Amino acid sequence: MESKFKRILYGGDYNPNQWSREIWEKDMEYFKDARINSATINVFSWAKLQPSEEEYNFAELDDIVDMLSKEGYDIVLATSTASMPAWLFRKYPEVARTDYQGRHHKFGQRHNACPNSAIYQKYAKALVEQLAGRYAQNEHVTCWHINNEYGGECYCENCEKAFRVWLKKKYQSISALNRAWNLEFWGHTVYDWDEIVLPNLLGDGMENGISTSFAGLSIDYRRFMSDSLLGNYKMERDIIRAYDKDATITTNLMGTYKWLDYFKWAKEMDIVSWDNYPGYNTPWSYTAMRHDLMRGLKDAPFMLMEQTPSQQNWQPYNSLKKPGQMRAQSYQTIAHGADTIQFFQLRRSVGGCEKFHGAVIAHVGTNDTRVFREVKQLGEELERLGTATLGSVNEAQAGILFDWDNYWALEYTSGPTKDLTYVNQIYQYYNFFYEKNIAVNMIPFDADFSKYKVVVAPVLYMVKEGMQEALTEFVKNGGILITTFMSGIVDQSDNVYLGGYPGPLRELAGVWVEEIDALAPEQTNTITFHDGTKIPCSMLCDLMHVEGARCLAEYSTDFYAGTPAITKNQFGKGSTYYIGTNMNSDGIAKVLEMAMAEAGVASVIDEATELEITCRKADTCAYYFVMNFKEKELAVPSCFVGYTDAITGENIKSGDTMAKFDVKIIPVAY
Ligand SMILES: [Zn+2]
């Protein structure tokens, strides 16, 4: 696959406008020393670019662009629309958002424009017209970065009006909407579009947005809000595109961020970019999952738009990255499909809430720091690596279904348990693949399933139109489907499929789930596999009957002892595994190992190891990324002996070991 870039972009957010010109010159020297070749600029400069409604001033931005252009930087040019100037709020209070509690906000913070404010749209559009007209033809502007970390929501009157228009388009008639949201429940029937009230705390929302009395309404509001913000993005993108039809345009996403349907967003983006901020205790496998999700959005290499070189400021505990950790994290990012490594930020700000956020140049203002040296080391290594890995692809025979509608719907449900969270369930299954070094793609509900041997669909609570047919076709033709409790329950509007769970998946799974038991945290059950293995289970237990499926494990206690907990159903040339309860990782591994053996899906290499290993395929060779994230030395797998590490140029010998945070990139010719 051809990369969007001619080299690995290595740099990050740079705000010279916060500094004097002498410092700019010094920065250029330092950055060159660290092999930094890219800068993301103009992320929050609207107030400076437009001091008043009538006046623009691009003098300083011109200077910054000129300086970076002369130095040969790849410029990632942001549009500055994520933080509005004070005068705009003062003159047009409607540009601010109204929050879930119904409070209309004032000037302050950022990421706070009402996406449905015509005034916000007008002024954002005018600014982007100016920027695109001025800089789109600059060959050093390699990428456009629209807005910043889109997110949040607005509950203002403009949004309410726009929501009604959105609903009218979707449902056509008020009776269809009444049916979709089942408004007869609690006597909520509406007779006019203007009777529809958005679901905030003053309306149908409950518990600060955690739950809602009509999930269909709240899920539609989520879809509408995601679409509204996406509309803002598309507006800016289209302006830039008009000035440069070949521009690479993105906006920085945030991994498993809940409130935007990123699969839908990615369709509008030329390349996915994202900001990776693991906490001090985030497992490496969790970060890997989020990288794979970001790659999966377009099934293509992505940009790492932001990571900190050292520490963050907004987590409860902002631990330093230990020596070697930033480098290892950067390689893990490339291992999962990144074509860029960019930091937030290049120089640490003097004030504001991010003054404790790490940067390449710290407050001391020199390059004589541990962090700088580590950034420089990585810069030199990436420069040596050159273009080798750019555009290479991560292939997988297994896919995990990730779907934002399901994310929202599952977490809006009132019952059967409050402990069920979407991403945690996905992660438990992802972690199996991670531990085994089996390549896996994160895939949307409308993916081409025929590309996969195995599709895992944990808690596929909402089965949308077309999913039943697609999954049936997949299994019929020999695919292996793994699904779980709380699957096949509702349609796109959160109304239950009548006729027994798991609704549209019942025939595929060959089971009927009659009841769902919820276990409190202090309660557990156990399941027993037919080879005698006992595995504890918790949270939810499906009470089910087999309808053609074979039972693989049964509950051991409670009144449903001896009834099926895990089943397998042959269907056409394939089969469906149904996991009726929440197991620990051993239980999940036991079932998934069976499924992988049946499907013939193997690990990236043939040897068992505790190292993380991924593979990116280029035209003439496969690049194996071998990484040690464990607290101990680990042996390099023997299959790599005799090959060369592309980072060091050294030959790999028998008996070689890797210390914690060590990374090797090993090209193996086809
Ligand atoms: Zn609004």
Image: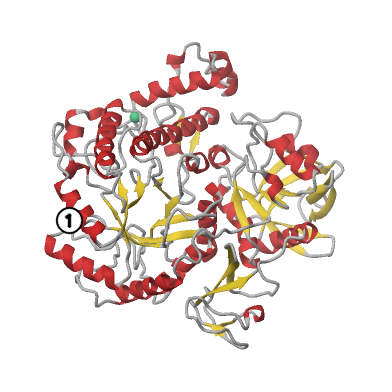
**Residue displayed at 67% across by 33% down:** 466
Expressed as whole percent of the image width and height from the top left, the position of residue 645 reads: 53, 78
The x and y percentages for residue 246 are 41, 44
Q: Residue at x 80, y 52 (%)?
A: 561
* Total numbered labels placed on residues in the image: 1
- Residue drawn where x is 56% and y is 45% of the image: 418
- Viewer-side residue, 235 vs 93: 235
Relative placement, left or right, of 520 versus 256 is: right
Residue at the disc numbered 1 = 18
User: Would you say 448 lies left or right of 616 here?
Assistant: right
| Left or right: where 541 falls relative to 206 | right
Q: Residues within 10 Å of mark 1 (few under 14, many from 20)?
A: few
The kind of secondary structure element at disc 1 is helix
Which residue is at a point 15% across and 59% down the rendered structure image?
Answer: 19
Image quadrant where one finds the N terminus = bottom right
Q: Can residue 42 be seen in the rendering of this structure?
A: yes
Q: Quadrant of the C terminus?
A: bottom right
Where 124 falls versus 597 (above or below)?
above
Amino acid at dot 1: Gln
